[in-house]
Image (cartoon, coloured by chain):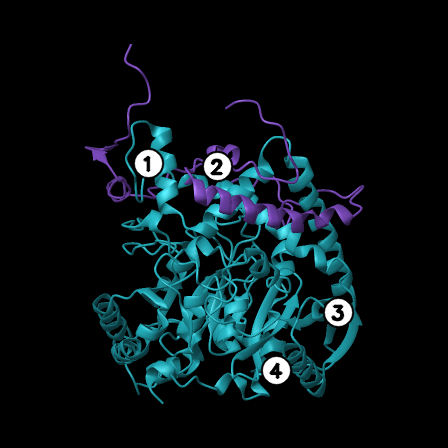
Chain colours: A purple, B cyan
Amino acid sequence: MSEHTPDLDHVDIHYVANLARIELGEEEAVRLQEELDSTLAYIRKLNELDLEGLEPMSHPHPQVNVLREDVPTQENDSEALLQNAPSRVQDLVRVPQMMEDT
Amino acid sequence: MSLAAKTLADLRSDLENGSCTSVEIVRSLEQRIQAVDGRLNAYLERDFEDALTQAEQADARRAAGETGALLGIPVAVKDLLNVKGQSCRCASRILEGYISPYDATSVAKLRDAGAILFGRLNMDEFAMGASTEHSAYGVCRNPWNTDHVAGGSSGGSAAAVAADTAVVTLGSDTGGSVRQPASFCGCVGLKPSYGRISRYGLTAFASSLDQIGVLSKTVSDAAEVLGVIAGHDPMDTTSLPEPVPDYLSALGGDLKGLKIGVADEFFGVGVEPEVAQQVQAAIDQLRELGAEPVKVSFPHLEYAVSVYYILAPAEASANLSRFDGVRYGNRVEAEDPVALMKATREAGFGDEVKRRILLGTYMLSSGYYDAYYVKALKARALIKKDADAAFAQCDLLATPVAPSAAYRVGEEAEDPLKLYLGDICTIPANLTGGCGISVPCGFSSTGLPIGLQLLGPAFAEERLLNAAHVYEQSTDWHNRKPSL
């Protein structure tokens, strides 16, 4: 991706759509851009707040390193998982070629 | 009264005293679904044959002397909970054809208690929406007036309970998605505290906010189901090891001395006068029942929607990156993997899901992270302080659930922001991790249900359910049925 200059008022829809791996049609992009910009304009209400000294709260109940015993279990049956694959070769999921032949 | 219209508690005693069988309950639901669901579209899938097989097994187990809190009781789930062998499309095109290889923990617990897992319920795609208009499989309509929405995102879960096409259902609540449709459809909607129920097998939307909830005809039915599905699970590190009390035995105490906090801010956020009036009448009723209303404040409520619409899309953009057309679900083939992902996601996701993924991706991208995401996390701490200060002065808060009764289909779909603002009264419980419930408290002038919301701090479910139960039993609202 080329250089990108942050703009806090507008969503650069094509830049973001590429990051999100969504291909957008031209009309769709224009419409989404407008809708997202108006949502952003509302969300910026947070700028009214003095947030100095507040600890960012990423989770309702602070938790650290929840661990459990490392015991092998049979959680899933690989055949049931593979049956959901959109394209399959034997016990593998088929995808388009990712790397050049060397 | 048909079996389909009965409460879980009544069906359980009917089953216990032999006055009905589980097979008869399933047949009664089948009849009701065939008669009305074509007008509602609450069910995305219903396999009557499988339900009858499960019912026959439950009847045989009962005949052999087995008991179980939910033995032979059908439970339907929102389409984002995994039930082994059933589809789980999250009302999205991108998961067409997907078959769950495992049970969600909450589902496994229902099974262990003897429940029949029957039916998958309509919702806004990936739980993003508040009207069940954003379902890839058609709008779910309100049983009280089919020109109106059922609410959302657990619209199917609420409509089915209200229309007597389900006894009790599970939904999920990220910003009000259980409580608001319960309010719109006139049933009970319980959002337990964050950490109370394992979310293993619940398709993740916003992981720091999501919680599984129960929709039911009465508060005691919700208490019963909560007791079955609550508790710690090693498969969900956010589920907490708090003991699970007997929620049913917590019901029926009086409300003497219970302090009900009333904050003006919850009534000043575009709440329509008739909604405010009904909620105020419910607070007066709680006073009659022995509770003591006290004035509290929630000064940063007006910022809750902004915080939510940064955090929820940010978390969603990460969670939904797993839907890439590679390992499961729909795929649009393309010449290289990135093109495949882009084309798959373009074709598979609906508008609202794209909006939120794009918004969240923007918030989390380089240069915006501090300006939006970190700021929202700090403002969330401020809202938590508001809640802590309020609950230092009162036991529960009483508020409206939504600013209005159910609106007309199509009325708000055009303006995403307006739809977002409707979540303001329900969002704080998700941001802070507390519990909340919606209980029917009246009707609008147009005959649509209105809900009272009670909110409690984290793990105050016994107090919350008792107050809701005592209030409910002192009114007639929960006995009203829509004429479909």
Residue A55: x and y in percent read 74, 42
Label placed on residue A17: 2
Confirm whether circles 1 and 4 share one chain: yes
Residues packed near mark 1 inside 10 Å, few (<14), some (14 to 19) or many (20 plus): many
Q: Which residue is mark 1?
A: B326
Instruction: Report the quarter where the C terminus of chain B lies.
Output: bottom left
Number of dots carrying numbers: 4
Q: Nearer the viewer, residue A38 or A68?
A: A38
Question: Which residue lies most toward the left here?
Answer: A90
Identified at 24% across, 69% down, the residue is: B48
Q: Assess whether mark 3 and mark 4 are in contact (beta carbons under 8 angstroms).
A: no
User: The numbered mark 1 sits on a residue in which chain?
Assistant: B
- Give the amino acid type for the residue marked by disc 3 in the picture: Ala
Q: Which residue is mark 3?
A: B263
Residues packed near mark 4 inside 10 Å, few (<14), some (14 to 19) or many (20 plus): many
Residue B243: x and y in percent read 56, 60
User: The numbered mark 3 sits on a residue in which chain?
Assistant: B
Real-space Cα separation, disc 1 to disc 4, in angstroms: 51 Å
Q: Is residue B310 visible?
A: no
**Residue B164 sits in quarter:** bottom left
User: The numbered mark 4 sits on a residue in which chain?
Assistant: B
- Give the amino acid type for the residue marked by disc 4 in the picture: Tyr
Upstream in sequence: badge 1 or badge 3: 3
**Camera-side mark, 4 or 3:** 3
- Give the amino acid type for the residue marked by disc 1 in the picture: Val
